[in-house]
Image: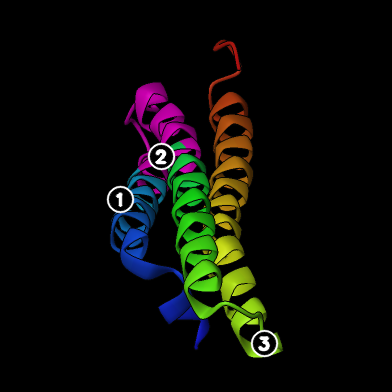
Amino acid sequence: MSFLESLGFIQYPIWIVLILMLVQIVRATVELVRPGVPAAGLRIHSILILGALAACLGVLGSLVGVWLAAEAISQAGEVSPSLLWSGIQVTLGSSIVGFLILGLASVAWLALQYASGRRDPGASP
């Protein structure tokens, strides 16, 4: 089982959230680079919200993975190492991706918050 297969059906909403977050990062960065355009604080904060949503989707995927792994193990009767490892992959895969997206969102949010504060010295961070 590949890593992408281990994400299961929860991977599609996670990829959508990642794409939306990357679009917001690009748009917020472009707004900070263009002179005369006010920084969009709401757009910067939506990056962090999308990251938190990805982490929640990752946890949901982990719960589904635990349920699927427990069901497969109970049907198999005995546990082989490959079945056990497959269950671990399904359980952890989506959480890893979700929290990686949250980490990316947090770093982008901090950088954009700092950049918007440096651009307009009168604005509060």
| Front disc: 2 or 3 | 3
Question: Which mark is on residue 50?
Answer: 2
- In terms of depth relative to the viewer, which is nearer, 80 or 114? 80
Q: Residue furthest right?
A: 81
Q: Residue beneath label 1, please? A: 20
Q: Is residue 113 above or below residue 63?
A: above
Mark-to-mark CA distance, 1 and 2: 8 Å
Relative to 45, is 13 on the left or the right? left
Magenta region, residue range: 28-52
Relative to 17, is 117 on the left or the right? right
CB atoms at circles 1 and 2 under 8 Å apart? yes
Q: Residue beneath label 3, please? A: 80
- In terms of depth relative to the viewer, which is nearer, 10 or 29? 10
Which image quarter: residue 38?
Answer: top left
Which of the two labelled residues, at mark 2 and mark 3, occupies the earlier sequence position? 2
Q: Is 37 part of what is drawn in magenta?
A: yes
Q: Is 44 part of what is drawn in magenta?
A: yes
Question: Which mark is on residue 42?
Answer: none
- x and y percentages locating residue 18 in the rendered image: 38, 56
